Amino acid sequence: MPWRRRQPPVAERFAPVVDVSQLPVMEFDGVIVGGGGAGLRAGLQLARSGLKTAVLSKVFPTRSHTVSAQGGITCAIASEDPDDDWRWHMYDTVKGSDYIGDQDAIEYMCSVGPEAVYELEHMGLPFTRTESGRIYQRPFGGQSKNFGKGGQASRTCAAEDRTGHALLHTLYQNNLRAGTVFLNEWFAVDLVVNQDGAVAGVVALNIETGEVVFVKSKATVLATGGAGRIYATTTNAMTNTGDGVGMALRAGLPVQDIEMWQFHPTGIHRAGVLVTEGCRGEGGYLVNKDGERFMERYAPNAKDLASRDVVARSMVQEIMEGRGAGENADHVLLKLDHLGAETIHKRLPGIVELAKTFAHVDPVRELIPVVPTCHYMMGGVPTNVHGQALTQGAGSGDRVVEGLYAIGEAACVSVHGANRLGGNSLLDLVVFGRAAGLHIEETMRQGVAFRAASETDLERAGARLVRWDHSVGGESVAKLKEELQRLMLVNFNVFRSGERMRASIHQLAELRERIGQAHLADKSRVFNTARLEALELDNLLEVAEATAIVAEARTESRGAHARDDYTERDDENWLCHSLFFPGERRVAKRAVNFAPKTVDTFAPTARSY
Amino acid sequence: MRISLYRYDPDADAAPRMENLELDIPGVGDLMVLDLLERLKAIDPSIAYRRSCREGVCGSDGVNMNGRNGLACTTPVSEVARRGKLTLRPLPGLPVIRDLVVDMTQFYRQYEKIKPFLQNEDPPPARERLQTPEDREKLNGLYECILCACCSTSCPSFWWNPEKFVGPAGLLQAYRFLADSRDTATEERLAELEDPFSVFRCRGIMNCVSACPKGLNPTRAIGKIRTMLVERGI
Amino acid sequence: MTPVASLGRSGLADFVLQRATAVVLAAFALCVLGWFLAAPVNHARLAAFFGTLPMRAFTTLAILALAAHAWIGMWTVGTDYVRRHYFGRRHALYLAIYQIGCAALVFLYLVWPLAVVWGVAR
């Protein structure tokens, strides 16, 4: 045993198990669960309108994962190219999504985008500037002019390579100014759903004190971000555990396109830390062990700036065919050294820092070892353009879930479809965070009452806490989490095979059993991070299982979902969203919106870069 | 590797204690301190610390490692360990909630005090406010702060007057807005900082500079605020 | 603004005064040191040197500078160290005692040398 205690272990301590019928209650007009970019943008909208707003976040807001976004926010503000048009951006996004992004939502995002970006600038976001004093825009993957016919566009607005940090801090600062109430370091345990299927708020845990509270609200917004931590290596923060998606699934609500996981081409080998696509936007490119710029073969036009799914697949193919670099030939190399020290230090200072710390190379002189790494969850809670969560009614039409909204990565509007374009996630956050805020404001003005919740409803929402606090003996959370993450990494990576996925579904069912019996060894009250990790494991499991079942069911290759047993896109059967219903674990289809309001439909065609 | 870990759970311990642990894994020096903590936590889940991005941009995991403040996620064990021993303590000068988790209320309060948001009451243009690259350049070295508190909790002036001295992190942000060509509240901001504590408790010992994991220089920013105050006074 | 009266209210005034008085003290020290090094010292020469009006004026300025400099410095040290955290509930009382003590000392070192220079005690 590599571990020895020199002091006797503290005996397992039992905190009094929560009595859900006696929960203290807090009341807000709007409660936003999650303090990242989307949550803070929605919070700002509500707080400015004078509504009693709380942002409930398991970390202090500026620790949220938005802070790690590097390259920028894509938006047609026509700074680098005065003729730029949001419709071109829309075309790129639809094509990038492999045609299962909803065109009404994409139209809304791309057309409202400039306004939302200017607002950020007015709030103080320190964008990098052009000589004329406008916002600097850099080229990113999948961007084109004139509907794919005008060559590479430069449409990603950047604050050096720290855009997410600048954006998140700016939003937090403006929330301070607007008087948003922050419940920092509070963890939402589960949604409180009443007998009518409406959401009445959340049961939440104050991490610092261990107190459990019913946070009652007229509108509950899930802004909990992604769940990249279902994978053993990911660019995602350790806190990205799919809490909102887990909560929705446990409440019996469906999730959409959850099989679509983006692998970012340039995660630092082993560490998993992200290296922005902006590196390639600024002129960097990928090479294999022979120093060959292999993307010229896979995407003759866009080369290294093809969309992420394409680049990631090409990289894996290079590695599989034995042209990987390094001792184990298990990665490729990102070349920046030809850009010159000045450009690198001026445009990519954060990358220099990360490459030195996590890859021990100085990109000014050396190549950075990179592999495709889990980066973004395209799927999530299905919503309309106002951020209202959707489920299916009796006649299998969309039905709004009363009192529930979802925004940002936790939601699936869907603007990203089967593959997100770089720089579109930050735009998604601010556009739909704002949209949800506007809609809630409007709804409140028309008058909404708090929804009743019975003791049973609260009990259901608090059940997880009780179950973990009653656990005696069983496997450890850390071990089960590692097993789950390995399983997902191996079987739901860039390429997927039906057989392995089917085996994984069985293994995940087993894991569900075992996690249900697992042990929370520390039951103390104050800042108990062991309890948090147990609660997060529940959420990881929900997301992983949904991913596995839907990925196996989608018998085609589209966007980020590439199967070696169904290698072609199948528009006849699968030009649609997938919906996963928990409980019966059923996969259903939902129509993609092809009816934008002001432009013609972009019809599906073969996708090449 | 011998690790001496600061432990305190207010419900179980009358006073904080140091727990001595041994972890023998190959290549321990190549690990980051956060990886080490993760390994320890997998064995003893009751160890409490904050962490999120694990790449040095979220600012969650500021801790004191062998007497030096820094981020656990970007500090290699080999850089701080001395003769196979590593002592981990919470950031000094703030109340401890549990183990390595400190109560940062006081720190955040100082940040809020300097009104950390752009103030410009002129109606904004239809597009962005213009800013020259030279003016934008002035914000470099200021806006990158991650609020990890490594600087302020290494500053004796902040230990002594945490409720009155804004501290290096807050002052760096104060200057970030003073230096922004788009901000018009310079006069109000300076007026708020004129008292004997907010800025003038800085003695220029530069602990903040050596602690900052992002390589920022709060002392220089404080110097610039002082210069602005003096110029305004004349 | 009236410098000493504003002590504890404007940090800027304190900051400027602290530095201005330091310059005066440095100049005075250099002046006296130069004189000491210039020729052998005896009481008659010393009395003659400090007896001139310009030197009396300069010395007065230096004494005032020392008092202001010392008071600002000691006040700052007191507000750094004499705090509840170290001294408990009665820290305010201790701080008051400390400040009265410092004020008395500063006053003593102000009045006594002034009296010497202007010959009141002669």
Image: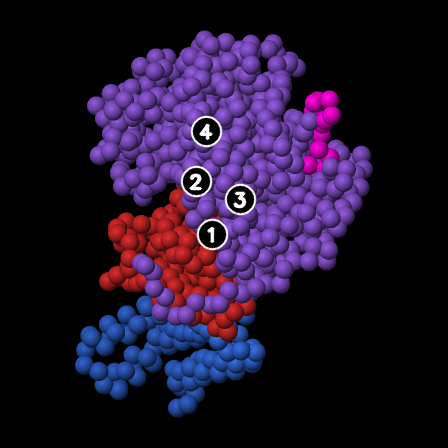
Chain colours: A purple, B red, C blue
Q: Position of residue B142 (x, y in %)?
A: 43, 45
Q: Is residue A318 visible?
A: yes
Q: Residue at x 41, y 14 (%)?
A: A609
Read off the magenta span.
A393-404
Between the residue at mark 3 and the residue at mark 2, the CA separation in whole angstroms equals 16 Å
| Chain letter belonging to callout 4 | A
| Chain letter belonging to callout 3 | A
Q: Is residue A559 above or below residue B189?
A: above
Q: Are marks 3 and 4 on the same chain?
A: yes
Say whether disc 1 or disc 3 marks the residue closer to the N-terminus.
1
Q: Is residue B141 above or below residue A331?
A: below
Dot 4, crowdedness within 10 Å: few (<14), some or many (≥20)? many
Secondary structure found at label 2: helix
Q: Position of residue A104 (x, y in %)?
A: 63, 19
Q: Is residue B49 above or below residue A193?
A: below
Say whether disc 2 or disc 4 marks the residue closer to the N-terminus.
2
Q: Position of residue A51 (x, y in %)?
A: 72, 43
Of the two numbered discs 3 and 2 in the rendering, the one whose residue sits closer to the viewer:
3
Where does label 3 land, which residue? A513
Q: Is residue B123 visible?
A: no
